Structure formats: structure tokens, C-alpha cells
Amino acid sequence: KAGVTQTPRYLIKTRGQQVTLSCSPISGHRSVSWYQQTPGQGLQFLFEYFSETQRNKGNFPGRFSGRQFSNSRSEMNVSTLELGDSALYLCASSLGGLGGDEQFFGPGTRLTVL
Amino acid sequence: TQLLEQSPQFLSIQEGENLTVYCNSSSVFSSLQWYRQEPGEGPVLLVTVVTGGEVKKLKRLTFQFGDARKDSSLHITAAQPGDTGLYLCAGANTGNQFYFGTGTSLTVIP
């Protein structure tokens, strides 16, 4: 069974631009969660989508948004990029059961904002 | 707000030594997971514990979930260089939202 895939793996943008990251979950997984990882803050939860609906949301500004498609693939969008948005963005997929299903992570997208 | 505190933050030991990493919180979790992450890659799930007091063993790794489901520990016996990495604990609430710990960076010196 193929793992979680994320594209692109690396991205360089300038301040003020916007970016879209993509995540394809493991086949059969209906939940996709997005995380931001930085050396100073560690892994921070952005949001979780389940069956095309946002089910959970972390404490990030509205510049960070996402969506999920009917095939469970998910995209994350960041508008008006800031230098502080430079980070490794990880997505994780799970079956989606409540109470903490096992999550499987993709390799991440390394975003650098100049 | 960091719900899960891990200690120590950094650990450098010689091959063959034993070590314990702690993951503590004031919150109760439905389940708790441990991951290992290597540079440039996503975290890889090691184990999930769901019952208070549960102990799980994976070869040289022993995981324990506290009786009150607020804390956990990871013990590695006879550490090897291949154990080097960032160890993360993550607690899940009933709504399937995960809260990650601050991480423990382990280096095992040959």
C-alpha cells in the first residue's frame, strides 16, 4: 500500500505571495491533518479534514486554509506569505475514527519564504 | 499552549547505554502515540497506547501509558546508532485532534 505523498517537496516563495501544498493520503483513509513544524515551536496542528469537512482547527490565522476533495486528497493554502511561515509542512492521514486513530505522515513540504 | 512536555530535550549517549524519555501533561488523552523523525522526513509512528497503565514492547523499546492517561514514557535498552533521531509523543483527544510534545533529540554515539 502506498504511503502518504506530498507535493512539492521543496518550495521557495517571497513575502506576499501565496502557496498551495498538496497531500494524497493512504488509500482508504478519510482523515487528513496538516501540521507546521519549526525548530522553535515544534509540531503545531493546523487543521483536520474528514469527508471533505473541516473537523478540527488549530490556532493559526485565516491566511492558512485548506480543503479536501471527494477522493480524500487535500490541499493547504497560505496567502500573503510572511517570513515566519518558513517551515516544514506535514500532512498525516488516518482512517478518521474518533479518539485518536493512528496517523501516518508524509515526507513534508519544506517552504522557504524570502 | 504546549499541552505535552517532553524531557529531556536533548540526549547524547554512548552505544549500549539505556535511556528513558518522558512525556507529561495535565490533560487526559484518549490515546497517546510515539513517533521517531529523522532529518528531512516526516515522523514515523512507533506505537499507540490507549489504556491507562498499558505497557507495550517493541524489541528494545518499552512504552508505558500512565494510569491516569496523562503521561507516558519511552525506555530504550542498549541504544544503537540507528536509534538516533527526534522522538515525539502525541496525545489525542476524543475528537481525533492530536497535540504533539516538544520533542527529544537523541544522539547515540558509536
Image (cartoon, helix red, strand yellow):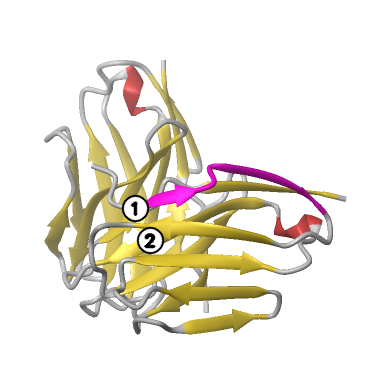
Report in which chain the residue with disc 2 lies: B
From the image, tell me which residue sits under label 1. B4
Count of marks, rendered view: 2
Residue type, mark 2 in image: Ala
Q: Is residue B39 rendered to the left or right of residue A51?
A: right
Earlier-in-chain disc, 1 versus 2: 1
Residue depth check, mark 1 versus mark 2: number of the one nearer the observer: 1
Q: Is residue B91 placed above or below B86 in the rendered structure?
A: below
- Marks 1/2 in contact by CB < 8 Å: the verdict is yes
> Residue at (37%, 35%) from the top-left corner?
A41
Image quarter hosting the C terminus of chain A: top left
Q: Position of residue B75 (x, y in %)?
A: 61, 67
Q: Is residue A75 rendered to the left or right of residue B36?
A: left
Q: Secondary structure at mark 1?
A: loop
Q: Is residue B107 placed above or below A30 in the rendered structure?
A: above
> Residue at (26%, 46%) from the top-left corner?
A76
Q: Please identify the residue farthest to the front as the structure is shown.
A: B67
Q: Secondary structure at mark 2?
A: strand
Seen from the viewer's position, the closer of residues A89 and B30 is B30
Count residues near mark 1 (Cα–Cα under 10 Å), then give few for <14, some for 14-19, many for 20+.
Answer: many
In the image, which disc is placed on residue B90? 2
Q: Position of residue A103 (x, y in %)?
A: 39, 69
Q: Is residue B56 magenta?
A: no
- Extent of the magenta region: B4-14
Residue type, mark 1 in image: Leu
Q: Is residue B13 magenta?
A: yes
Report in which chain the residue with disc 1 lies: B
